[in-house]
């Protein structure tokens, strides 16, 4: 009986156990199958060479590093130049960005300046007492009061003046005998700035005046009041300091790097913060010969007429001065100094990608120009409107380095994968038809040169490069005016230099590098002026060890000039050129 009970209990327990755990067991088995399937589908890649992808672990065939599994979110396909972080991480790291703007001091229409209004030092004057005495009354009530030449400013009592009047009256009595004595007495009063009218009044009335009025010899605004009623004065004591504000100075600060662009006689247009919707024009009449060591700036000055008194000293000014080098010059860009990371000879910034779902920052090498205040001018590597990281760049770079991505210490990825910086192409498609015909002949010479490289023929390449250079000489640049003329002159130098270099080189691979530079310039020129025939821009991503290179073709069929027969069909059409 006892055995029956045990058997029955075991059966019940088995059913119960099956009821509670069988779903989990089934799920576990299913998960195990899924995990096995997932493991079978795992892709392995190299952290340094993400183009390497294989379905089993091992070593990278390029660098020998151990391959790692691709992240489930597709991380193995991510651009090694772009570092991603969560929004929370970006907030905790204090990441801040600034848009790239036109910059520093150099702008398209001239040199941007800041400054302020200062009083004209040549019109500063003092009203002084020419005789010793005591002030009986003041007619100037407060600092800032405007006075005119001839206005009475004070009344003074002077014992010395009383004695001089007695001498005058006594000399007048014997003027028929000693006229020189009378003239000497008058001169004594004149030296004390007593007017002829006052002297004649004394002689006519035969009375001695105890108080005399002092009159202003200048017009202007009282800037300082030096005395009060009942003050005793010495001869030459200053009563008031006045400033004529009918003319003022506009004083601008110019960084030493820009001083070579400034000349006396140049016009400067500016506005004042306190006078909205008003633009002033003046002429530079002084450039400070000394540079302030703390700011590395020198002052330039222009004189402004201020008859209505609206322009006031210490007003802030913002101006632009047209310089010869600014006409037709490419606009300079600038970024704050805090955006730039230094690594030996290289300069690096992190650019925030605008359309990313999560905060993403691209490693970018840039070429720096001059220092302008707290900014660096950017020669290449950035475009207007891009956002650069100005706070937290070191955090991003350190994280990218730990993640085996491009960083200051890990440059290998960036060399082969860095995209070309965007170049702003001007629009001169309305240029004369005759110029476009001549440019079309240059393009035809270029296409013949390209064929020589497709055939990997160094001798033919040199000959066609010479023909290309000769065709450039036939282009009449006088047909272009203004900025279009300056733009063509700039590109003409580059086209001529690279084509000439091809004629000098004997090695076809070295010639191909010059052909790449020549092609880039030709593409820019044809985009700017337009092409009267259908041309194609083609790109080979494998050229120059993965750096990539472009060329122009008259047909969409790929004929690679950088590899020739070795990789004739490597490349694709990326753009077209036509009006």
Image (spheres, rainbow, N blue to C red):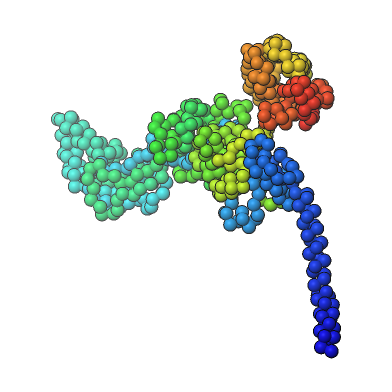
Q: Residue at x 25, y 52 (%)?
A: 231
Q: Which of the 4 image quarters holds residue 388? A: top right
State the quadrant of the N terminus: bottom right
| Location of residue 200 in the rendering, given as x and y in whole percent from the top left corner | 27, 38
Is residue 451 in view? Answer: yes
Q: Is residue 14 left or right of residue 214?
A: right
Residue 184 image offset from top left, x and y in percent: 19, 33
Residue at 43 percent across and 36 percent down: it is 296
| Depth order, front residue of 44/85 | 44
Which of the 4 quarters of the picture holds residue 521? top right
Kindly identify the residue that appears in the image at 71 percent across and 39 percent down: 52
Front residue (pair 106, 569): 569
User: Of all residues shown, which one is farthest toward the bottom?
Assistant: 1
**Nearer-the-camera pick, 246 or 317:** 317
Please state the horizontal and vertical placement of residue 255, each as a whole percent of the image.
47, 35
Q: Residue at x 81, y 21 (%)?
A: 554
- Can I make out residue 319 in this image? no
Q: How many marks?
A: 0
Whether residue 195 sits left or right of residue 429 in the image: it is left
Instruction: Quarter of the image for the C terminus: give it.
Output: top right
Coordinates of residue 258 in the picture (x, y in percent): 50, 31
Nearer the observer, 577 or 38: 38
């Amino acid at each position: 009986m006892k055995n029956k009970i045990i058997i029955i209990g075991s059966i019940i327990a088995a059913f119960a156990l099956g009821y509670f755990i069988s779903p989990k067991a089934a799920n576990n088995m299913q998960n195990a199958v899924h995990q096995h399937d997932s493991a079978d589908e795992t892709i392995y890649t190299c952290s340094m060479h993400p183009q390497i992808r294989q379905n089993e672990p091992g070593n990278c065939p390029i660098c020998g590093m151990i391959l790692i599994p691709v992240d489930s979110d597709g991380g193995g396909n991510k651009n090694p130049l772009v570092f991603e972080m969560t929004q929370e991480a970006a907030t905790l790291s204090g990441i801040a960005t600034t848009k790239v703007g036109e910059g520093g001091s150099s702008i398209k229409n001239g040199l941007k300046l800041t400054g302020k209004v200062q009083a004209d030092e040549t019109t500063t004057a003092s009203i002084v007492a020419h005789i010793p005495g005591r002030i009986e009354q003041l007619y100037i009530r407060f600092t800032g009061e405007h006075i005119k030449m001839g206005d009475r400013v004070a009344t003074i009592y002077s014992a010395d003046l009383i004695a001089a009047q007695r001498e005058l009256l006594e000399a007048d009595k014997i003027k028929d005998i000693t006229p020189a004595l009378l003239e000497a007495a008058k001169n004594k009063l004149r030296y004390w700035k007593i007017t002829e009218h006052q002297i004649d009044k004394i002689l006519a009335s035969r009375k001695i005046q105890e108080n005399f009025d002092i009159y202003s010899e200048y017009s202007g605004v009282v800037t300082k009041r030096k005395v009060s009623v009942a003050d005793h004065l010495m001869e030459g004591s200053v009563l008031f300091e006045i400033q004529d504000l009918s003319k003022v100075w506009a004083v601008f600060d110019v960084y030493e790097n820009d001083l070579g662009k400034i000349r006396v006689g140049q016009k400067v247009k500016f506005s004042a913060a306190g006078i909205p919707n008003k633009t002033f024009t003046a002429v530079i009449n002084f450039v400070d010969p000394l540079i302030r060591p703390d700011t590395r700036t020198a002052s330039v000055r222009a004189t402004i007429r201020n008859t209505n008194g609206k322009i006031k000293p210490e007003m802030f000014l913002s101006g632009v001065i047209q310089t010869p080098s600014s006409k037709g010059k490419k606009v300079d860009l600038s970024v704050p100094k805090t955006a730039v990371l230094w690594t030996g000879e290289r300069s690096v910034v992190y650019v925030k990608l605008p359309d990313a779902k999560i905060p993403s920052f691209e490693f970018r090498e840039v070429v720096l120009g001059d220092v302008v205040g707290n900014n660096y001018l950017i020669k290449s590597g950035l475009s207007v409107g891009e956002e650069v990281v100005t706070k937290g760049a070191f955090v991003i770079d350190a994280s990218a380095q730990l993640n085996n991505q491009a960083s200051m210490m890990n440059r290998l990825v960036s060399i082969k994968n860095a995209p070309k910086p965007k170049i702003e192409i001007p629009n001169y498609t309305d240029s004369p038809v005759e110029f476009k015909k001549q440019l079309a002949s240059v393009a035809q010479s270029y296409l013949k040169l390209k064929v020589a490289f497709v055939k990997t023929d160094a001798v033919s390449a040199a000959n066609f490069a010479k023909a290309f250079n000769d065709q450039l000489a036939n282009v009449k640049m006088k047909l272009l005016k203004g900025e279009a003329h300056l733009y063509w002159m700039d590109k003409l130098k580059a086209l001529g230099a690279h084509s000439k270099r091809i004629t000098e080189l004997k090695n076809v691979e070295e010639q191909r590098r010059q052909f790449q530079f020549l092609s880039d310039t030709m593409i820019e020129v044809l985009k700017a002026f337009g092409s009267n025939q259908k041309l194609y821009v083609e790109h080979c991503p494998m050229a120059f060890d993965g750096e990539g290179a472009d060329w122009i073709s008259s047909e969409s069929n790929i004929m690679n000039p950088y590899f020739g027969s070795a990789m004739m069909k490597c490349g694709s059409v990326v753009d077209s050129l036509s009006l």
